[in-house]
Image (tube, grey):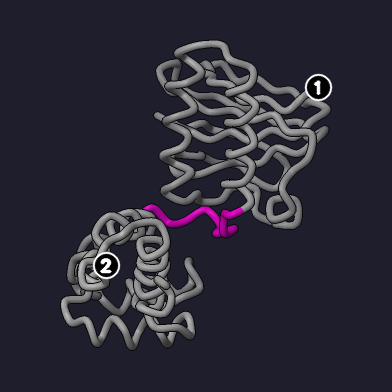
Amino acid sequence: MSNHLSIRFYSRKRRGHSHDYHQLVLPLRGVINIEVEGYVGKVAPGECVVIKTGEIHHFTANEEARFVVADLVELPSNLAQSESLVFSITPPLISYLNFIEKQLEHQVNPELEQSMFETFVLLLAEQGMFKQLDHRIRAVLEYVLEHLSERLTIDDLAKIACLSPTQFKKLFKVQVGLSPMQFITGERMEKAKALLMHTDYPIQLVAEQVGYSDLSSFGRRFTEHFGLSPRAFSR
């Protein structure tokens, strides 16, 4: 058996088996109902389920649902050491899954498929092992990551989660391990770092792209976060 990526669909008929390799199932469209030791439930787009070597698992799904399935000889260490069998994946990996689907449906190219697999594993290794998130918090995270340049308030995010501000802050901290504003600041700083590293945008534009209209406020926050000013980092 070799490392392998494929696009699959399953049926409504309950099936079960095991295999002598690890397998990851990442929904593209639709959900899979899965039963594996340590987890029984649904796995939806934006999530991944880990099925380890030799584990008997049962599954059902609507025929129109589609999944990226990865067969692996070895799991990245973050997955191998985690107690969570189902976890949320990052926007870059979600986008990469869509590319994998398009490429695998487009042509057979062993060299490109090997390169895709290697990139897939690198992205897997970057995943924070957040446990499967409450759908209300997942909706907020998706909104935040798509609107980092905008003003984000607790009241507005609580409305997205259909919770009171107090309930929202409590549930967010339990689910993510950070307060909403700590999470937002961290994501803004990481995006700013990437923009400074990979683009020639002026610092003012970078600040605006991550929600800071005041350049000095952005500079102070960036320096606190990384120990370097934006200007020093960009050099």
* Residue topped by disc 1: 1
Q: Residue at x 25, y 67 (%)?
A: 202
Q: Amino acid at mark 2?
A: Val
Q: Residue at x 36, y 59 (%)?
A: 141
SS of the residue at dot 2?
helix
Q: Was residue 128 drawn as part of the magenta stretch in this picture?
A: yes
In the rendering, at what x and y percent does residue 213 appear? 16, 76
Q: Residue at x 24, y 64 (%)?
A: 209
In the rendering, at what x and y percent does residue 163 appear? 27, 67
Q: Residues within 10 Å of mark 1 (few under 14, many from 20)?
A: few
Q: Was residue 91 drawn as part of the magenta stretch in this picture?
A: no
Q: Amino acid at mark 1?
A: Met
* Residue topped by disc 2: 206
Which numbered mark, 2 or 1, is in the foreground of this view? 2
Relative side of 184 to 94, left or right: left
Q: Nearer the viewer, residue 79 or 187?
A: 187
SS of the residue at dot 1?
loop
In the rendering, at what x and y percent does residue 232 appear? 41, 80
Q: Residues within 10 Å of mark 2 (few under 14, many from 20)?
A: many
Instruction: Say which mark, if any, is on residue 22.
Output: none
